[in-house]
Amino acid sequence: MLKIRSATAEDASALWEAEVEVAKTPGRLVSRPNELLLDAFVQKIRELGPRGCYIVAVDGDEVVGHAFLEPMTLAAVQHVYRLTIVVHPGQTGRGVGTALLSHLQRWAAGAPAVGKIELLVRYTNTDAIRLYQRLGFTEEGRFKDRVRLPDGESVDDIAMAWFPPKGTG
Ligand SMILES: CC(C)(COP(=O)(O)OP(=O)(O)OC[C@H]1O[C@@H](n2cnc3c(N)ncnc32)[C@H](O)[C@@H]1OP(=O)(O)O)[C@@H](O)C(=O)NCCC(=O)NCCS
């Protein structure tokens, strides 16, 4: 059965390995596989404990996906949290992404500091766009030719956002 819990530093290597695998498919994550560093995963999990929300989905002992919300740093935009979500290889299409994102939305609705959730997604990543739309995210803009794929082709990034209803979390 699927469960959601907070990420710990011990999860870092599983999350890193999964992202490296997912990043091998061009147009999914912006990072290329060699740009993903294990130490950065450990650091992000530690950092977001007090100032964001970093969660994993587990099925028994196996971590099957992870997601986090990270606040922007400047005071004027600190209420804006950026979303990252990665369902691990072989685990898509069974509700893991929905469970992770719904959990983060409930957390955001109950967190006074969160005023807006933003993300960027390649316009070719239709699975992700469908998930975001189904959970209430709307398109805010389009960055033309923003992401360069390894073959030299450029794809547009879509900016999407969701505003947490307050007092419901
Ligand atoms: C995009 C991504 C997060 C979607 O996650 P997912 O776990 O496949 O999403 P879900 O399984 O919750 O939903 C996908 C489909 O499965 C269906 N589904 C199947 N079983 C389900 C269940 N038990 N509960 C809910 N939905 C279920 C959903 O209805 C949905 O159908 P739809 O696409 O026709 O709307 C995932 O594909 C992923 O991590 N991709 C690689 C990384 C990536 O692209 N991240 C986003 C970068 S911006």
Image (cartoon, grey):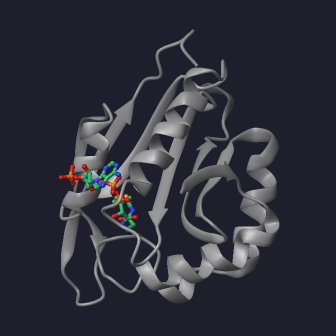
Quadrant hosting residue 115? top right
Q: Which one is in front, 90 or 110?
A: 90
* Residue 1 drawn at (x, y percent): 53, 57
Question: Which quadrant does ligand 1 occupy?
Answer: bottom left
Residue furthest to the front: 1
Quadrant hosting residue 103? top right
Q: Which one is in front, 160 or 90?
A: 90
Q: In the picture provided, is 40 more to the left or to the right than 122?
A: right
Q: In the picture provided, is 13 more to the left or to the right than 9?
A: left
Q: In the picture provided, is 107 more to the left or to the right than 20?
A: right
The residue positioned 29% from the left and 48% from the top of the image is 131
The residue positioned 68% from the left and 50% from the top of the image is 5
The residue positioned 43% from the left and 39% from the top of the image is 118
* Residue 166 drawn at (x, y percent): 53, 12
* Residue 57 drawn at (x, y percent): 57, 57
Count the numbered circles shown: 0
Above or below 130: residue 40: below
* Residue 161 drawn at (x, y percent): 36, 35
The residue positioned 21% from the left and 74% from the top of the image is 154
Above or below 156: residue 38: below
In which quadrant is the C terminus drawn? top right
Determine if residue 67 is in view.
Answer: no
Determine if residue 163 is in view.
Answer: yes
Quadrant hosting residue 30? bottom left
